[in-house]
């Protein structure tokens, strides 16, 4: 890779006013160029793709929305999605990413033969095959065209890789193992740069790379400041004094928040979101490591009531549980007051109910474990979605973002566990079960979905259980994709993007190596915090 295209070599630490002015001028020039290119939306697709891949889309959100809306209208009117495999697949992917419900059948009709198969002339079109594979990752349930497209692309790309050992082959295998749609964008930036040819024709490429370099340096400084504030908050909370065996991982908890909310402008929300995430982990450890069933039952009953002053049950709890509940009360109240002040809606009752649901789900699992009961796979996954903590964290985030906080949307998010949330929760729960390592301080394994499956399907093997779980994860991704498209209630929102990012973050947090470490998490932190990656 040429040095001029290396994104993660940062500029000098001290940004002069002249450098800042030049940065803003570059952004403005690129906006004007994008607007001009937008007169022909097909011309602008390459630039939009590069902007998104370089994680600088927050600078060009309005311009991109206008162009993609125009592109969607043209495609819908004329049923034309571009020329050649790569352009058609790129068009389809960009429109779906923007929330437009584009028909795969219509989009790829010109790329398939009379029997519905992808035409053989594309079998050596590496760029087109890669783009087809990437587009197939946005499939929804029942889309055979995209399933066929994925199989065609994987088969052809695998053959091409096996035919030669080269940089291109390694890049292709990396794409197949880590598709962009199911990965955090920061993890695929350098791969995108290595695949982008700078032949001088694309005069927008170097200005985009320069904006991305400066943005990265600013983002790194911002995240370092947020980490410092998170560590200070956690230290001052002092829960580790009472809970010495519980996980003490504020950097990992902050990483969840940083990965889910990638827009630099959402710093305050990132810092607030770390707090419920931290408590999910701590309370999980209380149920797994500390409490007996009787204590945990009272712990859950107290959480359901929330009125501590008139509740004698609190006095029956050990001190570490009391301290935890008091701290949780304070954090929940602080978040509720902030949301009310900013968005005019007080979420205190909704947040309290969500904590009660989480406690009850943890208690169910504790009772299963204590009694040796192995539930049906349906029981397990229904309870597991709640105990994953995903619905609770995303409910907090929904209120923090304040996007169209209407009575109908609050009711949908608070009471019915919408598909966009439950799909992300399913992905986390099942991927958690695939983790090969124990949590740091736990002495036993919890029951897993695969165990429940094998109990229900006598004679089945662990390989069959794993295959079934992987299919469940694939189906959950398809439902999540569907919920991000019009006319579903959260399509095109920051909340929808956050739900996707929850699912994208899961592999970092639950893919252990043989040393019980999380190499993906380490790589992600290095890519954001170090000068070189």
Image (spheres, rainbow, N blue to C red):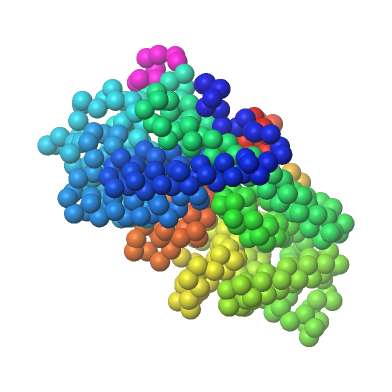
Whether residue 451 is visible to the viewer of this picture, yes or no, is no
Q: Residue at x 34, y 64 (%)?
A: 487
Instruction: State the residue lying farthest toward the front.
Output: 18
Q: Main secondary structure of the magenta part?
A: helix
Which residue extends farthest bottom? 310
Please, is residue 335 above or below residue 132 in the view? below
Q: Position of residue 221 (x, y in %)?
A: 69, 44
Q: Position of residue 425 (x, y in %)?
A: 53, 56
Give the quarter of the figure containing the C terminus. top right
Q: Residue at x 44, y 43 (%)?
A: 30
Foreground pick, 460 / 120: 120
Question: Is 531 included in the stretch rendered in magenta?
Answer: no
Q: Quadrant of residue 329?
A: bottom right
Q: Which residues are magenta?
A: 159-166
Nearest the viewer among 135 and 78 is 78
Horizontal relation, residue 215 to residue 202: left or right: right
Residue 164 painted magenta: yes
Answer with left or right where residue 528 lies relative to residue 125.
Answer: right
Q: Residue 215's x, y, as percent?
A: 59, 42
For the point 51% across and 51% down, the residue is: 58
Q: Is residue 450 above or below residue 382?
A: above
Residue 311: x %, y % from top left: 78, 82
Q: Quadrant of residue 77?
A: bottom left
């Amino acid at each position: 890779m040429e040095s001029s295209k290396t994104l993660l070599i940062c500029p000098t630490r001290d940004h002069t006013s002249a450098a800042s002015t030049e940065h803003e001028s570059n952004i403005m020039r690129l906006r004007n160029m994008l607007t001009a290119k937008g007169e022909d939306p097909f011309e602008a697709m390459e630039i939009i793709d590069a902007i998104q891949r370089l994680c600088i889309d927050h600078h060009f959100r309005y311009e991109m929305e206008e162009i993609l809306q125009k592109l969607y209208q043209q495609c819908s009117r004329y049923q034309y999605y571009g020329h050649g495999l790569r352009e058609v697949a790129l068009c389809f992917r960009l429109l779906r990413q923007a929330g437009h419900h584009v028909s795969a059948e219509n989009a790829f009709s010109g790329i398939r033969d009379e029997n519905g198969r992808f035409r053989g002339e594309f079998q050596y079109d590496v760029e087109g095959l890669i783009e087809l594979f990437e587009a197939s990752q946005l499939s929804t349930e029942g889309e055979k065209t995209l399933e066929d497209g994925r199989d065609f692309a994987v088969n052809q790309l695998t053959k091409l890789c096996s035919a030669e050992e080269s940089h291109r082959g390694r890049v292709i295998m990396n794409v197949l193992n880590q598709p962009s749609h199911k990965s955090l964008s920061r993890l695929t930036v350098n791969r995108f740069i290595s695949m982008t040819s700078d032949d001088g024709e694309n005069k927008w490429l170097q200005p985009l790379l320069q904006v991305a370099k400066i943005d990265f340096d600013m983002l790194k400084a911002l995240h370092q400041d947020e980490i410092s504030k998170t560590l200070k908050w956690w230290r001052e909370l002092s829960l580790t004094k009472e809970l010495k065996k519980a996980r003490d991982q504020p950097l990992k908890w902050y990483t969840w928040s940083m990965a889910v909310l990638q827009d630099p402008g959402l710093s305050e929300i990132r810092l607030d979101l770390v707090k419920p995430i931290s408590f999910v982990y701590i309370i999980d450890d209380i149920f797994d490591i500390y409490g007996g069933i009787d204590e945990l039952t009272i712990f859950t009953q107290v959480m359901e009531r929330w009125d501590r002053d008139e509740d004698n049950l609190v006095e029956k709890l050990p001190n570490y549980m009391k301290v935890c509940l008091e701290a949780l009360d304070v954090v929940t109240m602080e978040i509720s007051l902030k949301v009310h002040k900013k968005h005019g809606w007080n979420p205190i009752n909704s947040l309290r109910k969500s904590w009660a649901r989480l406690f009850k789900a943890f208690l169910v699992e504790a009772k299963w474990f204590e009694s040796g009961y192995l539930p049906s796979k349906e029981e397990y996954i229904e309870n597991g979605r709640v105990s994953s903590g995903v619905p609770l964290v995303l409910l907090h985030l929904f209120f923090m973002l304040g996007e169209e906080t209407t009575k109908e949307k609050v009711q949908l998010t608070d009471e019915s566990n919408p598909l966009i949330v439950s799909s992300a929760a399913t992905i986390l729960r099942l991927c958690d079960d695939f983790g090969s390592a124990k949590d740091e301080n736990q002495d036993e394994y919890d029951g897993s979905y695969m165990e429940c499956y094998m109990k229900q399907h006598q004679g089945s093997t662990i390989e069959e259980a794993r295959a079934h779980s992987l299919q469940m994860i694939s189906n959950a991704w398809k439902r999540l994709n569907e919920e991000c498209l019009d006319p579903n209630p959260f399509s095109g929102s920051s909340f929808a993007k956050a739900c996707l990012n929850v699912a994208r973050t899961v592999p970092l947090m639950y893919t252990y190596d043989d040393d019980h470490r999380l190499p993906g998490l380490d790589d992600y932190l290095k890519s954001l915090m170090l000068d070189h990656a």
